[in-house]
Each structure stands twice: as C-alpha cells, then as structure tokens.
Amino acid sequence: MFTIIAGVALIILAGFRYYVGADYPAYKNLFVGFSIYTDYSDVFNKAIFKKSAEEIEWIFVLINKIIFDLGMPFYIVTLVMAIITISLKLSTIYKFSPLPALSTLFYFMPVFFFEDSGQMRQGVGIAICVYSFRYIVERNLMMFLLCIYLALGFHKTSIVFLPAFWLVKIPMNSQRILWALVICLLLSPLEPYKLFGDMFTSLLPQDVSGGYDAYVNDSQFGGDLEYGITDIVKIFFIITLLIFEKEGSKKIAYFEYMRNLAVFGLCMYYLFRGTRIFAIRLPGVYMFFLTMFVIPSLIYAVEDRAKKILISGYLLYLSLMYFNFAKSNGKAGNFTPSKYQNILWK
C-alpha cells in the first residue's frame, strides 16, 4: 500500500511540475521545436538506425510530436514520462526488493529528483533497463534486448546496460569484489576512459547535460580530487556489501545477480571519477541496483542487532541527504517549498 500511495504521489509531483528541475526549460523549448522542425519520417528513420536529421532519441521525440500535434500542453509530456518511469521502477522494486518501502525511500532521495524530475529522458531509459531485470532472471535474451532497444529510444546511455545479461553470471565473493574495487580505485587517477576517445562523450548529448552538470555542484559530488558526500556514502555501501554479502546470497533470491550489477556500477564510478558527468550518469542504472536492491536486501538478510544498526544508519543517511539536498540542489532545481510549482495548484 505504501508503494502504491508513494507512486501516485510521486507521479503527481513529477508529472505536473512547472519549471522544476534543471532540464525543464530545455525540454520545454525542445517540445515546440520537435513539432516545427522534425518530420515523422525523421523519427522513424532514427528508429531503424537509418540516417536522420533528428539527433534526440526517437521515442522521446515521437511522444513530444504526438502530444503537440494533438494540441496538448507540455505538462502532458512530463506526466507521460513520469507515469512510465515511476511505475516501471516501483513495480520492479516491489517485485524484487524484500523491503520495498525502504527501497522506495532510497529511490526518493535523491534519484527521484535528479532523474525523474530532471533528466527525464535518462530516467525513463534507466526505468526500462531496471524493468528488464525480470528477463535477466528468466534468461530471456530476446525480451531483454527488446527492452534495451526501447530504452535507447529515450536515452543513448542505456547501451551501458547491455552487458548486464552476462555480468550476472560471473562468480563473485567478498574477496573478488574487494580486489575489483581496489584495482578500479587505483586506475581512477589515470583516467582510463580517455583510451576510448570520444566514444563515451557521444553518449552525453550537450542539449541538456550542461544544465545537469551545473545542477550537481561540488558540495554534492566532491570535485575531481576531493572526497565528497557521494564518495563517503559509497564507502559505507561497500563496507556493508563486503561484510554481509554471504548472508544476502543465502537468503535473498537472485541476490547474486543484483550484487554483480552493483559491483560493476561501483567499478564504473571509480573508473570514470575523473569527470563528474560520466561518473554520475553512465553508472546510473547499475547504481540503482546497489541502493534500491542490494542494500535493502542485506538489511533484510542480517540478524536483528545488525538489522537495527543498518536501518538506523541508513535512515540517518537519508535524513541528512534530504536536508543537504534541500540546502543546495533543491534550491537550484526549484524543489523547495518557496520555489516548487505544480500545474494542479499553481
């Protein structure tokens, strides 16, 4: 019941928001531009990977064009996107998390604000990738690939989730996890992503990523050389995983799958840490599995005393994150009570 109520509330808050979120002005301008300067033929050529004048992902453009051509306002776009992303994410949380209410709290702060009330194209892409986890579990490759194709129709960074179908089968334990993370951390100052040239840069369209980059300031991320809040929190995530990984593997169905995806996300984060936008955006879908599935699963699996300590610690973290977000990023994105506006009561 909590998950359903939370889902409806979040859809209203994100779907009917008015000039809320760093990317909102850019998306609102694109809404008109798509319908004036883009033909349906360009959209469908993009869908089948043919040469097209359209640079933005085709399903997102198609939704905008249809809504505009029907004479509907822009907030219908944000509503449709919110319904898709929040329903897919919360339904998957409900299906695979042993503590769906706690997972929903992790999702709310701060993923809901950054993704589904900001960079909504990537938010939907991540939602479809998260939903595809059920096909990874079923080992249904065709349905998994269909989900990746649909996710790419909203945001090209979804391609980073393609290896997930095979990553989940890699045998891992606490020792191997530690070695993988240590190696990635040691490689981090060498900026290994530069070996791939412009390949990763091409995954981040400049139309809205610049606004997002300014939205996530140094107090949130910590800068290239400093260790900020994000790094400190990840250390606690890693410690929790290393200590209680065995309990999770014994008691939680498909925990090993979630764990492998989370570890890969952490490795990506450290390998890309030299550039803020890569470190946060590219591993986003994998980090979703860390915070929304792995940590709640470990809390559920451990004994009562450890459970109480972990729940208290992570609820304290969520509370501190709430106030920190409100103080900095909340103001920048117009999420605070004095700045937030909603179509339903504006």
Image: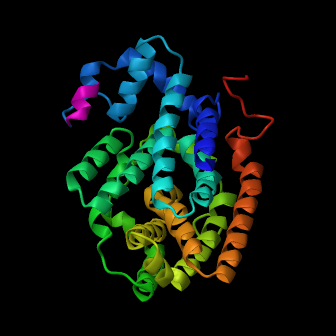
Q: Is residue 335 found left or right of 234 in the rendered image?
A: right
- Whether residue 75 is situated above or below residue 268 in the rendered picture: above
- Whether residue 195 is situated above or below residue 280 in the rendered picture: below
Using the image as rendered, state which of residue 160 and residue 14 is in the foreground: 14
Let me know if residue 200 appears in the view: yes
From the top left corner, tell me how far across and down residue 129 is, in percent. Answer: 38, 51
Using the image as rendered, state which of residue 21 and residue 238 is in the foreground: 238
- Magenta residues? 43-48
Q: Is residue 219 found left or right of 15 in the rendered image?
A: right
Let me know if residue 163 appears in the view: no
- Whether residue 319 is situated above or below residue 310 in the rendered picture: above
| Residue at x-position 63% and y-position 44% | 6
Q: Is residue 51 found left or right of 148 in the rendered image?
A: left
Q: Is residue 47 found left or right of 339 in the rendered image?
A: left
Using the image as rendered, state which of residue 327 and residue 303 is in the foreground: 303
Is 176 contained in the magenta span?
Answer: no
In this view, the residue farthest toward the right is: 338
